[in-house]
Structures are given as structure tokens and as C-alpha cells.
Image (cartoon, helix red, strand yellow):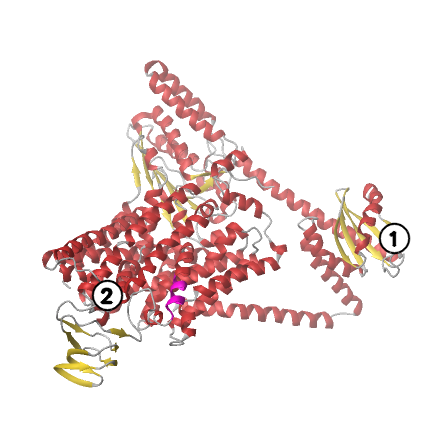
Amino acid sequence: MNSSYAVPAVALVVLATVLVGAFGLRISRTTSDFYVASRTVGPRLNAAAISGEYLSAASFLGIAGLVLVQGPDMLWYPVGYTAGYLVLLLFVAAPLRRSGAYTLPDFAEARLSSHAVRRLAGAFVVGTGWLYLLPQLQGAGLTLTVLTGAPDELGGLIVAVVVVAIVAAGGMRSITFVQAFQYWLKLTALLVPALFLILAWQGDGAPSRPFDEPSTFREQSAVRVDDTLDLKLDRPLTVTVKGTVDGRAHEDQKVRLPVGTHHIEAGTRLTFDKGAPVPDPDRGSSGSLSPSQAENRGERPLYATYGLILATFLGTMGLPHVVVRFYTSPHGVAARRTTVAVLGLIGAFYLLPPVYGALGRLYAPELSLSGDADAAVLLLPERMIGGLGGDLLGALVAGGAFAAFLSTASGLTMAVAGVLTQDVLPSRGVRHFRLGTVLAMAVPLAASALVGGLPVADAVGLAFAVSASSFCPLLVLGIWWRRLTPPGAAAGMLVGGGSALLAVAATMAGFPGSGALHALLAWPALWSVPLGFLTMILVSLATPGRVPAGTAAILARFHLPEELRAEVKA
Amino acid sequence: MSGFIAGLCVAILPLLAAGFWLGRRTVRSQNMGGLGTPVEHATFETLHTASLAAPPLRAGLTEETARKSARRLRSLLGTDALCLTDQKDVLVWDGVGGHHRTEIMELLAGPLESGRGEAFPLTCDTPDCPVRWAVVAPLTVDDRVHGALVACAPRESAVLVRAAGEVARWVSVQLELADLDQSRTRLIEAEIKALRAQISPHFIFNSLAVIASFVRTDPERARELLLEFADFTRYSFRRHGDFTTLADELHAIDHYLALVRARFGDRLSVTLQIAPEVLPVALPFLCLQPLVENAVKHGLEGRSALPGKSHISITAQDAGAEALVVIEDDGAGMDPALLRRILAGEVSPSGGIGLSNVDDRLRQVYGDAYGLVIETAPGAGMKITARLPKYQPGVHSAGRLTRE
């Protein structure tokens, strides 16, 4: 891909982020605009900011890659990512705002007045945040590699350094405008190229059937296999090979591969004829950015789909960087309106990645072989339009992808650093916040270097699962059940979130390679969420004496509209 | 790497705590066994039991605290049953013979009235009921009877009467301490209320004078100013809640500045820079306006000789879990030593409730780490920084529910 436009585009995005962050304050010099300057953030602006913070690399690149490789089954991902806000809207948004809590540990303390539960919630915020940061850094590495051929870790390092520099230097004096800007940037970066791509598709005679199984090559095309892989063939395939297949070296020979599994070495170049079906790769450990465990879904698709649905529906409410944004709404009703707007904005955004996935299936099916499926969004403009136009559109997409890494990573870093500063590091102060920022970013950066070869990108789904099993019970029961006790909340978070975390760790370490146990560990939400709820309820019922004293008053504050409270008091 | 170490620490911490606890337990029991004569040992044992029963009672006499302390008190007295009552009900019955509850309350009417201890025989239909006698010792705080301690035994015993009396006196002392704790809390609350800022009378006189000066020349302007004045005074005289939001406080500052500008005209310019996400932050009522008033005073005082402009800037930024509010003027400044004495309350500043009040209230609400940070020198202006946590237990802006 031509990097002469993409690199300036990425640099421009970084620069714009820094500038908006540093000068995004509302300034007033005369009397008349004083009032405007001190007006609170409206639902629409806040919703754009939440969406900007939420739409991460997994959304921007990963979904298109998944649809490309696995077809329309993967549409559950955008549905799940969006529907999480519906649950948030119905059960959590307004009471959470009225609780006055800024972070999840704050909520735990406000509801249960217990320092121990606060600490525990803080630990889970840090854990979830780190899990979620990991794929952002890896995605940045992948994007930079595709754009410029730079080494894999460089992109992650750049994002980490930029985010730490901005956040630690106090550059994000007003993060709302930055994130809202990032949302519109991301939407533009996908929407404009998508329009051109659809025009090109129309001009091509609008070939349909992108989801025919299996997808076929529309013209003779050559694929270079970057990672060693196994091909599973359902029918014989004739292909021109330059490299090593099944241990035998070939030099531009036409080879007829029989039905079965074939081992293809890295660096091999395969040339397919027009109309040939795209074979199904069977990859042990893919470096893909896709938020799924593709190879595992095949075995237990139903279980995996329900696991995904539960994790994304219930996990959104516990994402630390999403929760803090609700504080910006002036009151509970505004928080609800904000969530409705978020549903609209995110829903609109998620229409686009499947378009890229479907077009990728038509025009770049070989990406599923070369291991770069996640780069589909980045490569399609060049592939379908070409020339200067294609390069410029490609640069736009690349800028959008970097905006995705930057916004999510900075939001997460601020959330994690806030918790580290408040609850972990010894004393408070600006210097400690900087230390917390460095620590918040250093751990996932080190982890991304250490576990680089493993499918850590699945961490997005796994972060959702951990959040769904620890914070969802805490929030839902904390808001709607008056008999929740501190020991119950602590036990529920430990058992639910802890078991999900262990499952995640086992999956990341590649512990059981396959089988039913692997499916259970790779999609923990389906058992860990009920486990968390059950533990929390049972332990709370077993310790009725520990219900906090002011529970009735606290719940009244959570649920009564603010104006009503003022009248009650007056 | 540090994360790994942190993880390791987290993993080891529970083990360390468990080991510490276990070690403490074993060491203590050995010491108790080996130290002193049997009599001294018994004394230690008694004191230890008494000290274990004390903490729950320090929260006052309620069903929960009574339940927590009753078992210890019974082991102190060595009786079969022990019961704590308030003036109407049995709070807890520890030990056998719970069916005597109602009977005890009937018998208690006299002692609760007189405040003197007594012993009663109990009537019981159960043939082998071990509870035949009840020794009643009232619990008094400041000569008022709060409840009674009832110790039940199979037979009459002078020792038990004496012991119950002593234990009741000891419990009464704990309850008196609880009373003291409560008064201390009330004192702090009253202090916060007393510290609640009031607008300075000078400001009212000056504003009215300014408005009066416009009434003939520019009636429309006078009307506007009067409305500003009404809004500002409504805000500062409102009674509900000790806390407000940064947005409301800034609006009040806006009204205040409109009145000040009417008085000083072009000599004062104000810049406001606000990060909108910190506007919902809850903070003590009227704790920024005095800082702005201070800046206006200092800014204009420094310029009284020369006709130049004075400039004030108000900045509110987002800083992680805190909001950072900075109020800066380019006026006369102040000698840091004098400022330190003003904040320590040694000298009262000339007019205005000023900085020390705001500083006191911020420390009361958020803790000592959140006092004002003031940078100044004579002739160098003044920069006041206030850090406001976005969340603090118990701090909710207006519309707060009253505490029972």
C-alpha cells in the first residue's frame, strides 16, 4: 500500500487530537458569552464523545475482517456491541448518574459504603482496562505494518507514547471535544470511502452473492502466504505454486491438490485461477485483530454465539472508560437521552464495517489466506478504485483507524490511571496521576510485546466477558435490589469476575488447545455471568445483618428524578 | 514488570495477612497463659473481655450493638442469661429462658422509673427452667435512664447483684462516650453550617449604590442590574443543601461579575476558560465566589494609583478524577508570610470572609489534602488553585436527601 499519503494522514490525526485536547476549553471574554461557556454538555455532544471513545480498533477493522473470513454469521458482533447500550439505557444509565459516582469504584462505595468493595472494584477496573488496551496497541502495530511495513511493535509503541504524553502532560484539559471529534472523524473515514466503493461496485455491474459459500476468485490472483498455515480442501484444487507445499518445493508449477489438509510454508506464493473457490485456512495461532476465536466457533457455533451475545450485551455497562463519560451529563434524564443518542450514532457506524466485509469477500478474498483479513478496510480503496483517488481514500481510512486506537486508548488510560492514582498508589496529587498514567500504559505495552505471538486480539471479547461477570451484577443488583450487602458484592465480583479472568488468562496462555473445555474458557460469559449473579445474591441473603444502614435513602436518590428531590427537601 | 510485581504482591498479600493473624493469635494465648499469677491472669482475661465488648457499645444502644456486645457481657458476668433493654423493649436476650421477655419488661417499669437496681423472683410454668431470679441494673447517661441490663440466675445471689451493678456502670460509661461522639459529630456539622459563606455587606451596599446611580441615566441598565442582583442574592440566601454544582456556582459568579463591572467599567476584564465536563462536579456552596471577590479586590487595589486595566482569569479543567479550578489576578499580590497567618486564622483580613473560610470548608469536606494552593508575592498578582474531587462520599449537589 502506498504510504506516502497514509503517514501524513496518521500524523495529522495525532496532531488534531493534541490540538483539540489542549485548546478545547470553552473560552469567554465578554459578559454575553459567559453563560454559554458555563453551559453543561448536551446529550448529543456527550453521545458523540461516548461513541468516539467506544468505537475501538476491533470495531473499525476487526468486524470487516471477520465478515470477510467467516461471512454473515459475524454480524452478531456489531449487534452485540450496539445492544449493550440498550441494556445500559434500560437498567443503569440514569441511576448511575444520580448516584454521583465518577468511576465504578466510586459507585461501589456510594452504594455499599465499604472501602473493601471499593478496592476490589478498582482492581477489576484495572484488569478490564488492561485487557482492553492490549488489542488496541496490537491493532496499531498491525495497521502500521500494513501501511508502511514497519516492525510489528512500532505502531503500538507510537500510540502508547502519544497517549501517555497527552494524558500525563495534562493535555486533555477537555476530553469531551476530543472524543466527539474522533467519532465524527471515524464515521467520515469509513463513510466517504464506502460511498466511493459502492459506486465502484455499481460500475462493476453490481455483482451480488458476496456470501456464496465458498467465495470464489473473480479473476486470476496471486496470494503470498505470510504465516505458515494448513489449508482444508473439500474438493480438489488446481493452483500454481511457488514455494513449499506439504514439504515439497515447487517452482511455478501447476499443482493439483487432492481433498484433505495441506501444509503451506510461510513465504509461499499461490496463484489461483479465475473462478476457483477460496480455500478455508485452518490457522493455529493467527495474528488477526478479529475479536473472535474464529477457529473455535466452528466447533460450537451456538454456544459461542450465545457467549458473545451475553458478554457484549452485559459487558458494555462495566467498561471503565464508558462509565466515566456519564458523569458529564448534568442529570439522570440527560444521561438517558445521551444513551439513546449513543444507540443512534453507534448503530449508524456499525452499518459500515459489514459493507467493507462484504465487498472484501468479492474483491479481496485472498486476504483470508494471507493472514491480513483485518487489513481489508485499509486495502479495499486501493484495490477497487486505485490511482490517486484510491490512495487518498486509503489515507483517510488509515487516519480513521489511528483515531480509533488513540481515542479508545486515551480513554482507557485515563480511567485506569485514575483508579491507580486514587486507590493503589500511596498519596494523591498531580505527579501521582502522571505515574499512574505511565503505569496504566506500561503494563499492556509490555504484555503486548511478551504475548505477541498469541491470539491476544481476542482480548476485546474477553474484556467484555470479564466486565459482564464482575460489574454487571454489581451495577444491576446495586441499583435494583435493596438487600445487596458488601460481603455479597465482594464475593460475587470475586467469583464471577475472577473466574472469567482465570478463563481469559488460560485462553491467552493457550492452555487447552481445543475441545469442550476450550470453548468454555474462550467464551466464559455464558457461565461466569450467572455464577457472579448467583454468588452475589446468595452471599447477600446469607448476611442480612450487613445491609448498609442508609440503603433506602441511597436507592431513593438513585431512582428519584433530581427536581423531585429538591422539592422533597424544600 | 511493575504490573507483574503488583500482581505478585496482590497474590501474596492475603497469605501475609493470614500468617500475621495466626501468629498474633498463637503468641497472645501463650503470653496469657505464662504471664503472672492466676489472679492476675483472671484480671487480664476480664479486662480483655470487657475491651472486646466496648467497641459496639460506642455506637450507642441499639438492637445491633446490643446483639454484638451481649455475649461478651454475659461471659463477663458468668450468668445463664443476660438481657439488654431500652425503655420500651428487650433489645437482645442472650442465653436460656427467652420466654421471660414480656415478664421482664413488666417488672422493669419500676427500676426504669426510679433508676435504682433491684432483684426479682421470676414466675415460670416450665418445670426445669434455669432462670428463677432476675437482677436488674439500669443504664444511665447523665442521670437519665436509657435502658437496663438484666442478668438472670437460678437463685438469688448478692455477688451477682454487685457484679451486675458494676457491669451496668461500665456499660453506662461506654454509652456516655457514644453520646460524646454524637455531640462531636453535631459540633462539626454546626461548624460547617456556621462556616457557610455569607455575601459581604459591603458588596450589597456597593451594588445598590451602583444601581441607584443608573436609575435616572439608564433605567434599562438599572433594571438589568437589579435582576442580576436578585439572582445572585437568591442563590446565596438559598437554604437547602450545603453543596452546589460548579455550573451553578459559575452562574452566580457571572451575576456577581456583572454587578462588579457596572461599578468599575473598563478597568476590569475577565477571561473564563471552562472544560464543560467538569461542570456537574459537586462542591461546597459559595466556595469559589469568595475567591473571585478576593481576586477583584486585589486586582483593583493594585491598580488604584494607575489607570491601567486589571485582568482576572478563571479556569476550570479536567484532571482525571478531579476538577482543577484556577483563579488568577494580576493585582497587588500579598506577602506570603502574611497570607500564611491569615490562613492560620491568626489575623483577620481586612473585610470579606475571604480565603481562610473557603480553605477551612474545603478541608472539612474533602480532607486536608484539598486545601487551597495559593501562589503570590507582593506586586506579582495572585494565583489560587482549588482541586475538587469529582466524587466524594456524602457530597451531593442540591436536592440532597436529609440524613435521618
| Residue B376 seen in this snapshot | no
**For numbered disc 1, what is the local secondary structure?**
loop
Magenta-colored stretch includes residue A305: yes
Category of crowding for the residue at label 2, using alpha-carbon neighbours closer than 10 angstroms: few (below 14), some (14–19), many (at least 20) = few
Q: Determine whether A465 is above or below A87 in the image.
A: below
What residue type is disc 2 on?
Asp
Expressed as whole percent of the image width and height from the top left, the position of residue B187 reads 61, 40
Expressed as whole percent of the image width and height from the top left, the position of residue B196 reads 51, 35
Q: Chain of mark 1?
A: B
By secondary structure, the bulk of the magenta-drawn segment is best described as: helix
Q: Which residue is mark 1?
A: B122
Image depth: mark 2 or mark 1 in front? 2
| Residue A40 seen in this snapshot | yes
Q: Which residue is mark 2?
A: A212
Q: Chain of mark 2?
A: A
Left-right relation of A351 to B283: left
- The residue lying toward the viewer, choosing from B361 and B179, is B179
Q: Which residues are magenta?
A: A300-308
